[in-house]
Amino acid sequence: MTSMPRHSPHECPAMSHLWSTLTAAPHRITFLPGALLAPLTLLWWLFDLGLRYTGHPGLADASLPAPLLHGWMMIYGLFPFFIFGFLFTAAPNWLNATKIPRAAYITTALCMGLGVVMLYATAWSPKLGLVGGLLHLAGWGTGTVALWYSVARAAPQDKRHAWITLVSLGFGWMGDALFFLWQAQGTAAFVSGSNALGLWACLTPLFLTVCHRMIPWFTSRIVPAYVLIRPFGLLWLMLAACLAHAGLQASGLSALTWLVDLPLAGMTFWFSSVWGLRPSWSTRLLAMLHIAFLWAGLAFALHGLESAAQALGFNGSLGMTPLHALGIGFFSTMLIAMASRVTLGHSGKALVADEATWKLFWLIQATALTRMAPDILPVPPYLVFVAGGLWLLTFSAWAWKYAPLYWCPRADGKPG
């Protein structure tokens, strides 16, 4: 029997075949810009922060202040590449539906990628930011419509997870549009609305829904006699809490979000307990998912405590800690865990987190804790730069390890 052809990450196709390999599967061309943007986003932020810290002008101009651009990049410029790559791959498989057309996922990746690049160039020409915004919205819309067609045309079955992710993407598109309306008109309410929609109506519901679908399923593939527990009643309550938080935040009523944040934390911790963290430790890729999900409960609890403190008159008691527990602790940790798994599985590699991947996973935990520390502990403020450096190291190393798998053929010789 002849053995299947094997390829190392450096045995890549000739330049003439590079494009066909990169676009052979939707996760390749969407994950690649995400992998490259993850370190570049923090490199830009650290450089800008360093300039302003030493009294020099920052990289962004007054038309788009650096903190606002940094917030947009983290919410809309980074995570959506991995989200679309994952959903383009997973949603049709969930429903045995029509695959996402090649033209659709290429258009999504190229328009969003070019849009991000033009946003970075806003400091030199504000008009580029508006053009980049339109391109980014076009790419996001193309991907959402393509997913909608795939889900809608699938045979009648349980489509709840797929529909929830689509609605979340719709809210994300609206939040993205609000940001560029702010650029065009300067209405401050558009920025707060954009942030609220992006974080609490798009990213958080989407991440929670994917976890609800995938974590118990992945666990059932590893743990013997495992019983899948994923009640939809609690998921609906969690999603309602996220939308309520978005509405309260956008309305300037952050002091009331504890009413939904604390119950949301309780429900999240309940899911962690019934999904079983301890049995997963024997398999690193699975343990990474369970540990990442714990961050969600902690982030919601911190948001609830911060809101309650505001209601009692202690404004800013936790600073940016809740936000970074959510963005770095939950989203970024889950990204490392899920993107590593998808990349390995769809590159013909063994579904095993090697020592390097395992260490990078723990390095992003250290990044989250280091970034949170200056807001809650009497530690030097320069730890913010240390946290940025840890992020840069983590995602640069992750990209160095995994990015070649997107432009090289599958290791098992299969198509895709």
Image (cartoon, grey):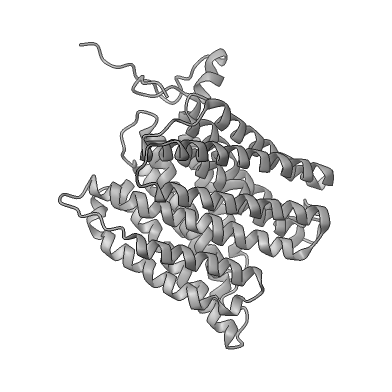
The residue closer to the viewer here, 148 or 414, is 148
Total number of numbered discs in the rendering: 0
Q: Is residue 312 above or below residue 375?
A: below
- Residue at (33% x, 16% y) in the render: 5
| Residue 231 position by quadrant | bottom left
Task: Judge from the rendering whether residue 352 lies leftward or rightward of residue 108; answer left or right.
Answer: left
* Residue 48 rendering spot, x and y as whole percentages: 72, 54
Quadrant where the image shows the C terminus? top left
The residue closer to the viewer here, 323 or 153, is 153
Quadrant where the image shows the N terminus? top left
Q: Is residue 61 above or below residue 150?
A: below
- Residue 371 visible within the image: no
- Residue at (81% x, 59% y) in the render: 186
- Residue at (39% x, 61% y) in the render: 235
The residue closer to the viewer here, 361 or 85, is 85
| Residue 292 position by quadrant | bottom left
* Residue 409 rendering spot, x and y as whole percentages: 43, 22
Task: Judge from the rendering whether residue 204 lies leftward or rightward of residue 138; answer left or right.
Answer: left
* Residue 237 rendering spot, x and y as whole percentages: 42, 67
Q: Is residue 143 above or below residue 285?
A: above
- Residue 220 visible within the image: yes
- Residue at (52% x, 28% y) in the render: 101
* Residue 161 rendering spot, x and y as whole percentages: 41, 50
